[in-house]
Amino acid sequence: PSVINKIAAGELIDRSAAVVKELIENAIDAEAKRIDVYLEDGGRKLIRISDDGVGIDAEDLALVFRSHTTSKLSSAEDLFAINTLGFRGEALPSIGAVSNSKITSRIRGAISGAEIKTEGGRIGDVRECGAPEGTQIEVQDLFFNTPVRKKFMKTAPTEMSYISDVLTRFALCYPNIHFTLRHNNRTVFNLPPVQEVIERIETFFGSELKKHLLSAFLREELFSLKGYIAPPFLNKANGRLQFIFLNGRYIKDTAIYRAISDAYHGKLMNKRYPIVFLFLTVAPSEVDVNVHPTKTEVRFRNKSVVFNYVLSTLKDALNKSQP
Ligand code: ADP
Ligand code: MG
C-alpha cells in the first residue's frame, strides 16, 4: 500500500537530518516556542522531537500519516501566498512509510491527548492517551524497510554533523525559539531564546568572529534584507560560511552566492569565501518555493532584481566600513 510513499520518501527523506528538518519545520509552523531534539545512534535508531506548539486533535491525527494531507493550504491560489514552512503534506507520510513512528499530541487546553502509530506505512488507529500540551514525534528504525537507503546512511558522527548543520540553520533563523539537541543522553546544544541573532552567531562561531562582523545593514524597499558580513580571511572553515535565509527558510541560491562574491570582487583571499548571514524577506508572490520537495531551492519571479538588490546592499555596507 505504501509504495508511492516510499518513492516520495526517497526524494524528500534521504537521511536522518532530513527527518529532523521536516519535523522542526512542522513544530515551527505549529508556533512552538521550544523544540527538543533527541537522537540515538545518529538518528538511525531513534529521532524524537517534542514541541510546545498548538498540537493536533484526534480527528486530524488520523490523517497526518496519509498522503497529501496538509492543514496549511486550502486552495491552489494559496500556493502563491505561502507563509508556512510546510504546505505539501508529504513529510509525515514519507517518514511514516520508511520507519516505525508514533505521534503523541495534545492541543492547548484539551483535557487529554491522542496518539497514532505507523509501522512502515501501516497506519494504526488513533488512541486517546495522556500527553503534555504540544506534539511529540518518535521515529524509530529509519529505513528498516528500504535497505538501499539504509546503506547510504553514514556513521553516527557523520549523521550528527548533518543534523547539527540543520539545527544551526534553524537556530540562526529563529533566535526566539528555545532549541535543544541531545544525542545518546549527551547534550549537544542547549540554546535558550535570545533577542538578536548576533547572540546565536556568537554562540556558534565565537566572539572573535562577532567582533569582526560588519555592522548590520538593513534596507526596506522592494524587499527587506538584513544581515552580517565579514571578510574571507576570517573564514577558518573549509568552504562556505554563508547562510541565506529567505522568508524564514534556509536556502541555497546561486544568484545570491554570486552577488556575495561580486560584492567582494578583487578581495577574495586564498580562495576563501566571505562570511555572510543574510535574512531576506520578500512578498510570497515574488518567489516560488514549490520547486523541489526539500524546498532549499527557490525560484524568484525576477532573479536579476534580487541579485542586484543583494549586490548593491552588500557593496554599500562594505564601502561604509572602509573610509
Ligand atoms: P505539511 O507540513 O506540508 O502540511 P506534513 O506531512 O509535514 O505536511 O504534516 C502534515 C500535517 O500534520 C500538517 O499540515 C499539520 O497540520 C500537522 N502537524 C505535523 N506536525 C505537527 C506539529 N508538530 N504540531 C502541530 N501540527 C502538526
Ligand atoms: Mg511539514
Image (cartoon, rainbow, N blue to C red):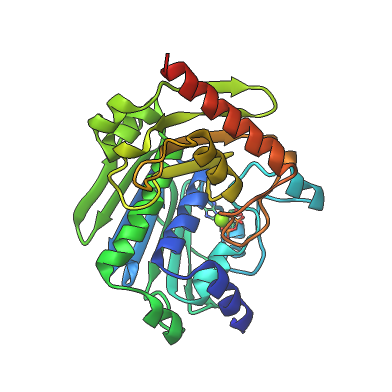
| Numbered label tally | 0
Image height check: is 217 above or below 127? above
In-front residue for pair 203/25? 203
Give coordinates of residue 8: x percent, y percent.
Answer: 60, 73
**Identity of the residue drawn at 38% across and 82% down:** 151
Image height check: is 47 above or below 295? below
Q: Quadrant of residue 284?
A: top right
Ligand 2 rendered quadrant:
bottom right
* Residue 52 visible in the picture: no
Image height check: is 119 above or below 270? below
In-front residue for pair 284/39? 284
In-front residue for pair 263/300? 263
Image height check: is 305 above or below 132? above
* Residue 290 visible in the picture: yes
Give coordinates of residue 1: x percent, y percent.
Answer: 62, 84
Q: Is residue 172 left or right of residue 212?
A: right
Q: Is residue 68 left or right of residue 168?
A: right
Give coordinates of residue 226: x percent, y percent.
Answer: 52, 27
In-front residue for pair 77/249? 249
**Identity of the residue drawn at 68% across and 55% down:** 290
